[in-house]
Image (spheres, grey):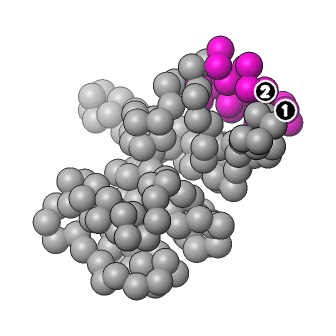
Amino acid sequence: MDTKLKTKLERYLKNASRFLWGLSRENQKKTYPWLISKGKKAWGPQFDFKYGPYAEVVDQLLVNPGIEKLLTDLVAPIITKELFAEKALDFLRDCWNNGKQPSIDDLKKYNIHDPYPFCEINTQFNYVERWGDFAGVWFEEIEPWFKEEKENQNGKLGETQTT
């Protein structure tokens, strides 16, 4: 990850309206143990942080494990394996790229029962109220970076196989 993208993604994380873009969907008391459990599975028993305000914990996470590992080992698996199927992400990406908010009926077609953190639902009137903070970060920054990394890895594999 180049320095420009790294600092940009760090700023997105620091300025997100919800801690870790709201991926835990819980309060601080439940989120920190959730994060420690996921972190220890991803990065081993040495992963830890000192409890404190969200801003302080984010600063600690940007040091250990760092933004790149946060994205590859925590954020991406939650999004792509726990919350959204590939076709659902494709649909949401198409909506995003076309400047269109999905409807509740569209979400149901793609088996998306809860589009959070990509979209926010007005539960009183049952409609998609707005795109969430995370949508732009994911579709405009994180996904393209993953695609580029994958292409770089495939290129390196091809180079080593031909030499």
Q: Is residue 61 visible?
A: yes
Residue at the limit of the structure toward the front, as seen here: 124
**Closer to the camera in the image, 92 or 18:** 18
Q: Which residue is drawn at 24% across and 59% down?
A: 37
Packing grade of label 2 (10 A; few <14, some 14-19, many >=20) is: some
Residue at the limit of the structure toward the right, as seen here: 99
Dot 2 corresponds to which residue? 103
Q: Residue at x 52, y 81 (%)?
A: 55
Horizontal relation, residue 30 to residue 131: left or right: left
Residue at the limit of the structure toward the top, as seen here: 109
Residue 156 occupies which quadrant of the picture? top left
Q: Quadrant of the C terminus?
A: top left
Q: Which residue is drawn at 32% across and 34% down?
A: 157
Residue 64 occupies which quadrant of the picture? bottom left
The part of the chain drawn in magenta is: 88-109
Query: What is the x, y in percent for residue 75?
Result: 45, 51
Dot 1 corresponds to which residue? 100
Mark 2: amino acid: Ser
Q: Is the magenta stretch mostly helix, strand or loop?
A: helix
Instruction: Give above or below for 93 relative to 25.
Output: above
Q: What element carries label 2?
A: loop
Q: Do the residues labelled 2 and 1 touch (CB within 8 Å)?
A: no
